[in-house]
Amino acid sequence: MKLTVFGATGGIGRELVRQGLAAGHDVTAVVRDPARLTVTGARLEVVRADLTDPEVLRPAVAGRDAVLSGLGPRARKDAGIATRLTRVVLAAMEAEQVRRMLAVSAGPVGPAPVDEGAVDRWMRGLVSAVLKDVYADLSEMEAELAASGTDWTVVRPPRLQDKPVTGVYRVVAGGFPARGRFISRADVAHAMLGMVGDAGVVKQGVGVAY
């Protein structure tokens, strides 16, 4: 497949590039600073862009089978960035009639597990209160995707870890795995790549966790 990755220098984005290349895909990585992208490969194209103008991004998404986004706030002060940047990406995609889009959100943005226990309910409430602005940004980003003409999927992980890919995790379309408290960035990327061709998760939020 031909894939474009936004946020390619972040933890999940870098894994999307690395694992996409390892699977034999042609990968275009869109970055603001190419020097920060440590992944290399014969099938890799690196495009420098600051994500302010959809017209500039059109060549980076034209003819692609899917666009994958690891864009999002890295700290509370970055709240608002996910919605703003995703809006620009969507405009470029729609101009080029590219339909498949997968983006990273967060577990607390989606519905709680049906059988959520008291401890997990308390933890969810605490984290949601502390990161209220971040989750409001991600929620608005999800709304932008839902209103777009793309075949979107949002992937909602819990707390992220810097650990190797395992390929072993739980996936719940339209919900979230019960007692799912952690997952590695590498496994989030693995899950996203596996969902590219999955019609069952189109236009859905998908919870992923160990």
Image (cartoon, rainbow, N blue to C red):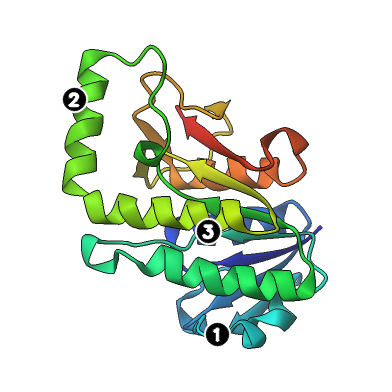
User: Disc 3 designates what residue?
Assistant: 144
**What residue is rendered at 22% in x and 49% in y?**
131
On the question of residue 44 being in view, the answer is no
User: Disc 2 designates what residue?
Assistant: 122
User: Disc 1 designates what residue?
Assistant: 49
Crowding at mark 1 (Cα within 10 Å: few <14, some 14-19, many 20+): some
Gap in Å between the C-alphas at discs 3 and 2? 29 Å
The amino acid on which the numbered mark 2 sits, given as a three-letter code, is Trp
**What residue is rendered at 21% in x and 39% in y?**
127
Horizontally, residue 74 falls left or right of residue 191, namely left
Gap in Å between the C-alphas at discs 1 and 2? 41 Å
Which of pointers 1 and 3 indicates the residue nearer the eye?
Answer: 3
The amino acid on which the numbered mark 1 sits, given as a three-letter code, is Ala
The amino acid on which the numbered mark 3 sits, given as a three-letter code, is Glu
Secondary structure type for disc 2: helix
The C terminus, quarter of image: top left
Gap in Å between the C-alphas at discs 1 and 3? 21 Å
Q: Quadrant of residue 62?
A: bottom right
Q: Earlier in the sequence, mark 1 or mark 2?
A: 1
Q: CB under 8 Å between callouts 1 and 3?
A: no
Crowding at mark 3 (Cα within 10 Å: few <14, some 14-19, many 20+): some
42 above or below 173?
A: below
Secondary structure type for disc 1: loop
On the question of residue 78 being in view, the answer is yes
146 above or below 108?
A: below
Horizontally, residue 43 falls left or right of residue 118, namely right
